[in-house]
Amino acid sequence: MMHRAKDIIITVAAAAAVSILGCGSGENKTAAGESNATTVAASSEAQVSGWSQGDQAFDFTLKDLAGNDVRLSDYKGKVVILDFWATWCGPCKMEVPHFKELHKQYQLKGVEIVGIALDQQGAKIVAPFIASNQIEYTTLIGTSEVVQRYGSPRGIPTTFVIDQNGKIVTSFMGYRSKDVFEAEIVKLLPQETVAPAEAG
C-alpha cells in the first residue's frame, strides 16, 4: 500500500504513513471496497484544512497534456470544479463519469471541470487514461507546490468548488455522487441559466 502514497506528489514527510481516504488499489479495487470508501467519505464533512470559505483560490499555472500552460485565472467568471485525482485511485475513477456528464450539461452555462492528475509518471500515464475514457474536460498535471497550496489533502479524490470570482466555496475529500457536485453548481449559476430541469 505504501507505493500508492508515494504516487501522490506531496512533500509532507508523513504522507507515506497516511491512509488515502477513499482511495482504492487501482484496478484491483473491489465493489465492496468501493462501497466502504463511499460510506467513509459521506460520514464526515471531510473538508480540507488550511482554508476558509470565501478564501481566494491559489492561481496556479500547470501544464495540460499537450504541454501548454493553463492558469486557474483563465476561468475567471466561471464556476470551477477542481478535482485532485490519480489514475490508480478507484474512487477517483468512479467520479469520472459524473464529471463527464456535468461537463456536457454545464460547460456552455459557465462551468469548467478541471482535473489535476497526481500520478508520479505524469502525462505518460495520464494521457492514455484520458484518451481511453474519452474525457473531454481539462486535465492538468499536478505539482507539489499546487498540492501544498490547496492544503496538502490527506486523500484523493479531493475536490474544490470555486465560484466565478475565484473564491473557494467548499471542498470534498473522498468520493461524492454527481448530485452533490450538481447541487453546488446550481447554487452558483444564475437562476435563469439552470431553471429548466436538466434531463437525466
Image: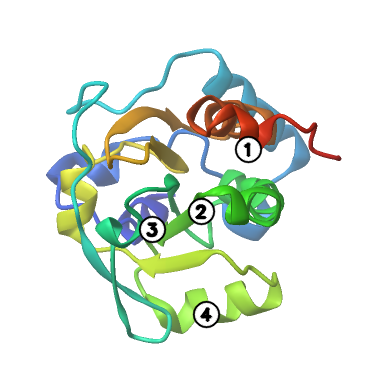
Q: Which mark is residue 104?
A: none
Q: Which mark is residue 113?
A: 2
Question: Counting residues from the N terminus, which is met first, the one under dot 2 or under dot 3?
Answer: 3
Type of colouring:
rainbow
Residue 54 lies left or right of residue 65; in this view the side is left
Query: Decide: marks 1, 2 in contact (CB < 8 A)?
Result: no
The residue pinned by badge 4 equals: 127
Q: Residue at x 53, y 24 (%)?
A: 187
Query: Decide: marks 2, 3 in contact (CB < 8 A)?
Result: no
Label 1's element?
helix
Residue type highlighted by circle 2:
Ile
Question: Counting residues from the N terminus, which is met first, the one under dot 1 or under dot 2?
Answer: 2
State how far apart marks 1 and 4 are (Cα).
Answer: 33 Å
State how far apart marks 1 and 2 are (Cα).
Answer: 17 Å
* Closer to the camera in the image, 87 or 73: 73
Quadrant housing residue 64:
bottom left
* Dot in front, 4 or 2: 2
Q: Quadrant of the C terminus?
A: top right
On screen, 164 above or below 107? above
* Closer to the camera in the image, 10 or 72: 72
Sort mark 2 into few (<14), some (14-19) or many (20+) by Cα contacts within 10 Å: many
Question: Counting residues from the N terminus, which is met first, the one under dot 1 or under dot 4?
Answer: 4
Quadrant housing residue 181:
top right
Q: Residue 96 placed where, x, y %?
A: 64, 53
Q: Residue 139 placed where, x, y %?
A: 46, 67
* Dot in front, 1 or 4: 1
On screen, 57 above or below 177? below
Q: Residue at x 74, y 33 (%)?
A: 32
Q: Residue furthest front?
A: 192
The residue pinned by badge 1 equals: 193
